[in-house]
Image (tube, helix red, strand yellow):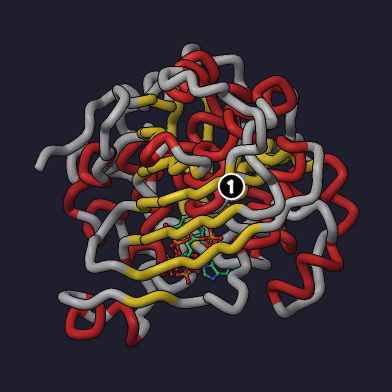
Amino acid sequence: MIKVGIVGGTGYTGVELLRLLAQHPHVSVEAITSRSEDGVRVCDMYPNLRGHYDDLTFTVPDAKRLGAMDAVFFATPHGVAHALAGELLEQGTRVIDLSADFRLRDATEWAEWYGQSHGAPTLLEGAVYGLPEMQRERIRTARLVAVPGCYPTAVQLGYLPLLEAGLIDSSSLIADCKSGVTGAGRGAKVPSLLAEASESMKAYGAFGHRHLPEIRQGLRDIAASDIGLTFVPHLTPMIRGIHATLYGRLNSGQLNGDPDALQALFEQRYANEPFVDVMPAGSHPETRSVKGINTCRLAVHRPGNGDVVVVLSVIDNLVKGASGQAIQNLNLMFGLEENAGLTAPALMP
Ligand SMILES: NC(=O)C1=CN([C@@H]2O[C@H](COP(=O)(O)OP(=O)(O)OC[C@H]3O[C@@H](n4cnc5c(N)ncnc54)[C@H](OP(=O)(O)O)[C@@H]3O)[C@@H](O)[C@H]2O)C=CC1
Ligand SMILES: CC(=O)N[C@@H](CCC(=O)OP(=O)(O)O)C(=O)O
């Protein structure tokens, strides 16, 4: 069994790691941290886990204890992994970070968007961006993986086939994205209150959200050209889910009027991807169809056979957008089946 620890076990991505790992055939969770719930049994705080982790208790983070693990997940706010990851890596422990600490390759850019200086710039060179559909081979040998953010996962997977094939103009992309409220974490915040978030919807971060540089960096790698992207996130009254509506303008002379070419492109690009499902032509994927699972469902449209392509991309923010993708990365890093622990179907309704 692979011994793992989780730093930040009381948050939504932490408890989602526990839920998914309870079904994992090759992983045993041996350490879980919380400073505020030190000494509390996991199943007393999260009764959905009763019968799974009856002997597991939250403890304060301790580098020596965590360094005895084969791998440690960080499900913590930005900046925490900066402080601890180096010490764990030195002890031979592999690190899978769900926060944004190692997602941007440029420490100066990170500092500009996150409002604090980068705490571990020397680790950046060895960090691998954990989007398996782009970086699978590098992830297999990585010791430090930066799990992509939820919006960046939905947006990059949607644009990937189009940009790789050079079909759309990379300077005029528009990503209109909606998220459920668990995307904001479990901490008490006024915008997440029932009376604030239910029966209402609003955009936020239209002036520039911290996922913008992350998405741009990923799309630049795919397109090998500069990216012009307008990204506007919205908060919607769902618990889980991200819905991204992605627009791109076809480069002139592309597709030559072939009505099936776009669909065929997406189906071919993702034919061997275990966690990307290209839906039949004309589909409109629903967020509830990915509730609790690690799948990104996509549909591609070309309204009126015009020169605009619309991609619809849905994920569960807590699974393919965070904890599920983190486990997919662990499976690759340890040479396991890529879908180990990630095979259950989605909840419905
Ligand atoms: N929610 C989502 O959909 C997604 C979240 N993420 C990212 O994953 C990370 C975790 O998110 P989420 O689960 O929502 O966060 P939460 O705010 O729900 O939980 C944060 C956890 O971190 C612990 N923690 C906080 N500060 C520290 C610290 N200084 N040292 C050690 N532990 C600390 C908390 O426990 P305690 O304070 O008791 O120690 C808690 O268990 C974040 O970086 C987030 O941006 C990524 C993708 C999607
Ligand atoms: C609805 C909501 O508030 N979403 C979060 C992003 C979700 C996320 O987890 O992003 P990171 O992994 O980069 O933290 C936000 O907009 O800040």
| Rendered location of residue 293, percent (x, y) | 31, 35
| Rendered location of residue 252, percent (x, y) | 66, 36
Q: Which residue is mark 1?
A: 148
What residue sits 65% from the left and 23% below the top? 136
| Rendered location of residue 82, percent (x, y) | 73, 61
Residue 57 vs residue 248, the one in the foreground: 248
| Rendered location of residue 62, percent (x, y) | 62, 57
- Looking at the rendered image, the quarter that the C terminus falls into is top left
240 relative to 266 in the view: left or right: left
The correct choice, above or below, for 192 with respect to 270 in the image is: below
Residue 187 vs residue 151, the one in the foreground: 151
Where disc 1 sits, the SS reads: loop
Badge 1 density bin: few <14, some 14–19, many ≥20, Cα 10 Å: many
Q: Residue furthest left?
A: 349
Picture quadrant of residue 81:
bottom right
Is any atom of residue 9 visible in this view? yes
The correct choice, above or below, for 182 with respect to 68 in the image is: below
What residue sits 50% from the left and 23% below the top? 257
The correct choice, above or below, for 153 with respect to 265 in the image is: below
At label 1, the amino acid type is Pro
Q: Is mark 1 within 8 Å of ligand 2?
A: yes
